[in-house]
Amino acid sequence: MRVPFGNVKSWVAAAALAASAALVPVAAPATPAGAASGTPPQVYGAWHCSDDACTWATVRDMADFDRANHWLVDRGDGRPSVNLVVLSFVNPLTLLNGTTNSGNANGVPVGMNQAVVDYFTSRGIRVMLSIGGITYTDDWNTALAQNPALLGQKAAALASQLGVGIEIDYEQSSGPNVTGLQAFIDAYRAAHPYDASGADPAARLTIDVAAGDRWLIDLDQYATANWLTTAKPVLDYANAMVPSKQPSADAAESNWQEHLAGKTNYSPAIPPLAPAKFTGSLYIAEGSRIRPECNDFSSSVTNATSSWTRNAAPAGAGTTTGLLGYMFWAAERPSTRGVTTAPPNSCEGGVGTGATTLGIPLPMPPLRQS
């Protein structure tokens, strides 16, 4: 739920160092002292925009990359602050065409390379690549119209090459090409079948939906009914993306409850989504402001919603309580004129403290399936 090239995306408006510094992940306690009751989050991740507003158009110097992003791999005690990083974004049409230019090699941003992936995976952090973002919505439409199966095959090959998963961020607000997206998913799953164990990183395939059920309605309905069921899952889970600005705790919980309950008054109805099949998302860097999510966990919306997210009950789908986890938008520089999470704004005191308080597992375990 994010915009490259200097804009903060609004769903309402439709708007080698890693090896030398590798740490051995140490699992956090399952229920630390002071943690709320309920089901601890399993997914606790950050979208990552590199230093150029989500284009990843340059190869990073890994010493500089570590300086800007060390908080992600070390919350202050040697343990990572997150168990997932999603590199954002790959242009779907560029990937389909295998474009090579100043910022891409064979369709992939040159900054999304093995060195960056290994920087995180060597610390036990799972890595995914996000295909899309609102800036590339038209390119999603073009690619899905041209050859969605080939796009799925290329995404699967990229996942295999780098040892990563893939996130679908297709933000067509009305009339999305779900037939084409189905062909994309079918082709991807032909190469990487659904894997409940999580053992194969490339088998992790997820999708982004809106913060609640009132935007991306057609995509939300189709994905919930066809790809995110507990009986026959096709995608691993969905991310309920950030809204246009940081919500209050009550507003965030209200948005996420819409996914749990669905919308029976819509035609076709959006069915309920199991709590174990989606994450909730919040800002760490928003416009010109660093949020408490980054530097003050005790004052954060994450903290204020943590009891609710751990105890959110099924409302027609699934059997276990608790959302799958949290995602944060976004590490380093999500917009050209906005704030960065590089020092002195690094997020050990927010996301990192939250990882300790909430007992985030490292590495990410097999995910709840019901």
Image (spheres, rainbow, N blue to C red):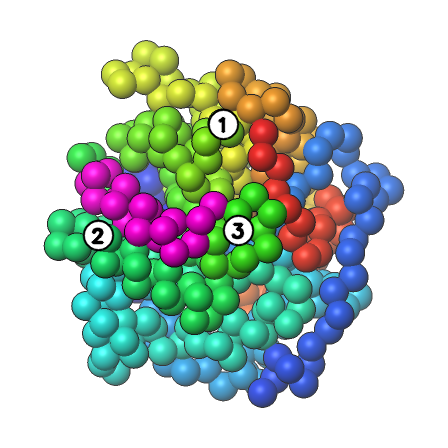
Q: Amino acid at mark 2?
A: Pro
The residue at 63%/56% (across/down) is: 83
- C-alpha separation, residue under disc 1 versus residue under disc 2: 26 Å
Q: Amino acid at mark 1?
A: Ala
The residue at 67%/49% (across/down) is: 365
SS of the residue at dot 3? Answer: strand
Q: Amino acid at mark 3?
A: Phe
The residue that disc 1 covers is 231
Marker disc for residue 148? 2
Task: State left or right for residue 2 relative to residue 83.
Answer: left
The span shown in magenta is: 177-194
Q: Position of residue 311 (x, y in %)?
A: 67, 26
The residue at 46%/70% (across/down) is: 162
Q: In the picture shown, does residue 61 fall above or below 280? A: below
Q: Nearer the viewer, residue 196 or 20?
A: 196
Marker disc for residue 328? 3
